């Protein structure tokens, strides 16, 4: 399947709206032509966006890396933490322009979906910084250092198609070709338009009647509108030779079409399958070649057994013939009667360099013509047995070949199995924030920055919750979620501890700080009349319940919830109590990245699968801001 320009129009708008306000929190190389972006938003669920030379789509699958992507390092360097500000397309050209902003820098990631496809990273002036494929053809050059130049525009602007511009395309060519070439539409849409019109596709377009012209124009504009704007009735077809996604239902009503919830979901199914199949082919190619070679060897060995058995049988038949001749009173092998009988068995006496042989088909057995017929016959019988004995040797070789073949097939299957994906787990709402479960099994949720501070208070604060804050710059708001009004002293202390540790107190190693908690009705979400408040700040009225925090310690841990593993950071006691493994940290020491690597290495010893589930970025995200050192693991 190739992505059509009119389909891209819809995707640019749809994906652009869904990713508004998101930034790139991680990028993975899937294969040489495909990259997976993890997009993060302070208050919304993460989005996984696949950007490939075959298409662009939001996915719920994380494909395991198949082969290196030479763009990955540069894209991570320039685009990580950069905000995706817009996605654009010029007309219906099969090119998407992703604009990322990072502080004062702006980058454009240009993805071309035609030909072999291309992915190009440019700076604000559209100078090429990196690209998949350099191009040097008559009408354009693409290489690092040059300004990006799109291909020459071809055909009419179908999004603004008028009757006049449509009529100008007509010629002696068939109407099917006219629509396909003139409007740049894929074959499947051309066939649908022709099918709906009832016109013979080979009919010269300049012979189309006015009535047919009006009908065609109406069908084309209606089809374009449905594809680019909706409403959609999407489906996919996955057959041996057809893998395709359709945004709208076609009139031929293909019985093999499977309905899907959205065109994006259809693309995810089709393109993911295409990437996986190519990956399996790539991984299994060496094994396939070896399998082919071993199967050929096995066939040759089977044929060799048949040849040897046939030789043995033929030689034995000649030996029996000589015994029969002896019974008939013949004694000299040179006798004409015997030589004629031998010829009927494709056998004869020959001499090579003075040495006599009995030649039977292609076999040559040395004999003494002066010996008696029984003596010669016995020698032939011995040769027949010798030939048959060779079968056992060949059979032993066959068993070895079969064993190698079986192991190679198994290795090939394992290699194919290495190419796969995991469904991206739908995270709970609180996983976007700081969070942990207290020793009393109560959920505590805190902000990461001003935006998330604002979100947890405005969106998730409920009447039985307790609100925590510390009088330290950069303190998060924490919520202790409650089903009832019962006060749990241990939980209150643990959330107070987390509130201080996740504040600036950690960065400056400020020990002996305090946190306080209040009830929800004491938190005012608006500033007093005539005053203003910073984003993420709230007015606190009434009595504040202070809790002294004597130490600065946190613990990172992994615990299992249902079928999922969750990475969490909070006060040491509840983390130790609940988690399969943990690492206690204190302020000072190493960078967040180095500490994350050290903790990950410890946790991977507990369960090797953890390295597939959690990336270094996940550990970094769990840590408090600032340097830390690991003081205890378990």
Image (cartoon, rainbow, N blue to C red):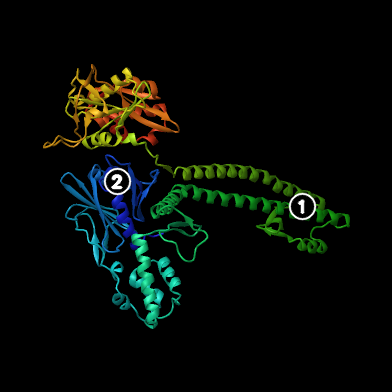
Crowd tier of the residue under label 2, counting other residues whose Cα lies within 10 Å: few below 14, some 14–19, many 20 or above: some
Q: Is residue 530 visible?
A: yes
- What residue is shown at x 11% (from left), y 37% (from top)? 530
What label does residue 72 carry, if any? Answer: 2
- Counting residues from the start of the chain, the first of labels 1 and 2 encountered is 2
Element under disc 1? helix
Looking at the image, which residue is at 81% across and 64% down? 336
x%, y% of residue 600? 34, 30
In the rendered view of the protein, which quadrant contains the C terminus?
Answer: top left
Say above or below: 615 vs 104: above
Contact between marks 1 and 2 (CB within 8 A): the answer is: no
Q: In the image, 477: left or right of 223?
A: left
Image quarter for residue 407?
top right
Depth check: 431 or 187 in front?
A: 431
Instruction: Please state which of residues 120 and 80 is positioned toward the viewer in this rendering.
Output: 80
Query: Looking at this view, is 419 or 202 the one in front?
Result: 202
Mark 1: few, some, or many residues within 10 Å (few <14, many ≥20)? Answer: many
Residue beneath the point at 71% across and 54% down: 310
Q: Residue 463: percent from the left, percent from the top?
A: 31, 29
Task: Give the residue drawn at x 72%, y 57%.
Answer: 360
| SS for dot 2 | helix
Instruction: Report the mark closest to the observer, 1 or 2.
Output: 2
Q: Residue 228 at what x, y percent from top left?
A: 34, 61
Q: Quadrant of residue 565?
A: top left
Q: Which residue is mark 1?
A: 316
Q: Alpha carbon of mark 1 to alpha carbon of mark 2: how far? A: 71 Å
Whether residue 359 sits left or right of residue 104 in the image: it is right
Quadrant containing the N terminus in the rendered view: bottom left
């Amino acid at each position: 399947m190739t992505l059509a320009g009119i389909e891209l129009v819809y995707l640019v708008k749809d994906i652009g709206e869904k990713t508004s306000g998101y930034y790139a929190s991680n990028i993975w190389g899937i294969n040489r032509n495909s990259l997976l972006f993890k997009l993060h938003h302070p208050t919304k669920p993460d989005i996984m966006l696949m950007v490939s030379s075959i298409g662009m789509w939001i996915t719920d699958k994380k494909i395991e890396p198949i082969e290196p992507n030479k763009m990955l390092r540069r894209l991570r360097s320039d685009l990580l933490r950069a905000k995706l500000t817009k996605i654009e397309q010029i007309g219906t050209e099969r090119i998407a322009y992703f604009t990322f902003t990072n502080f004062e820098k702006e980058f454009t990631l240009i993805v071309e979906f035609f030909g072999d496809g291309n992915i190009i990273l440019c700076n604000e002036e559209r100078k090429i910084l990196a690209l998949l494929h350099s191009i040097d053809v008559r009408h354009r050059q693409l290489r690092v250092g040059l300004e990006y130049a799109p291909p020459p525009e071809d055909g009419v602007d179908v999004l603004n198609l008028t009757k006049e511009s449509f009529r100008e395309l007509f010629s002696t060519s068939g109407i099917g070709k006219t629509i396909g070439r003139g409007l740049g539409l894929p074959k499947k849409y051309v066939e649908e338009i022709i099918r709906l019109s009832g016109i013979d596709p080979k009919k010269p377009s300049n012979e189309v009647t006015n009535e047919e012209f009006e009908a065609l124009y109406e069908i084309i504009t209606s089809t374009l509108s449905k594809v680019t704007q909706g409403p959609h009735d999407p489906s996919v077809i996955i057959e041996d030779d057809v893998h395709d996604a359709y945004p709208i239902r076609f009139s031929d009503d293909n019985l093999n079409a499977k309905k899907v919830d959205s065109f994006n979901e259809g693309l995810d199914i089709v393109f993911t399958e295409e990437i996986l199949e190519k990956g399996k082919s790539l991984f299994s190619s060496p094994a396939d070649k070896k399998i082919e070679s071993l199967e050929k060897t096995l066939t040759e060995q089977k044929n060799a057994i048949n040849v040897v058995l046939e030789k043995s049988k033929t030689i034995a038949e000649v030996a029996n013939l000589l015994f029969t001749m002896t019974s008939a009173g013949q004694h000299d092998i040179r006798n004409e009667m015997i030589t004629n009988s031998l010829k009927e068995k494709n056998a004869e006496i020959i001499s090579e360099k003075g040495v006599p042989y009995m030649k039977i088909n292609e076999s040559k057995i040395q004999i003494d013509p002066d010996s008696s017929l029984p003596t010669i016959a016995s020698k032939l019988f011995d040769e027949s047995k010798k030939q048959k004995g060779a079968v056992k040797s060949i059979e032993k070789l066959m068993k070895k070949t079969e064993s190698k073949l079986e192991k190679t097939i198994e290795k090939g299957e394992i290699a194919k199995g290495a190419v796969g994906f995991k469904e991206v787990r739908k995270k709970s709402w609180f996983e976007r924030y700081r969070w942990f479960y207290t020793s009393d099994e109560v959920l505590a949720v805190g902000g990461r920055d001003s935006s998330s501070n604002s979100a947890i208070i405005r969106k998730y604060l409920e009447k039985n919750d307790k609100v925590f804050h510390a009088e330290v710059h950069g303190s998060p708001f924490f919520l202790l979620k409650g089903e009832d009004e019962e006060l749990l002293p241990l939980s209150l202390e643990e959330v107070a501890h987390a509130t201080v540790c996740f504040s600036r107190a950690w960065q400056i190693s400020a020990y002996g700080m305090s946190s306080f908690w209040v009830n929800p009705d004491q938190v005012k979400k608006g500033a007093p009349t005539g005053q203003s408040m910073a984003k993420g700040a709230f007015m606190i009225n009434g009595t504040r319940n202070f809790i002294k925090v004597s130490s600065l310690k946190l613990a990172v841990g992994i615990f299992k919830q249902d079928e999922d593993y969750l990475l969490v950071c909070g006060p040491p006691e509840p983390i130790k109590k609940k988690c399969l493994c943990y690492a206690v940290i204190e302020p000072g020491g190493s960078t967040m990245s180095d500490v994350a690597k050290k903790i990950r290495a410890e946790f991977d010893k507990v369960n090797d699968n953890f390295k597939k589930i959690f990336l270094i970025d996940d550990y970094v995200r769990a840590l408090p801001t600032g340097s830390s050192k690991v003081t205890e693991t378990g």
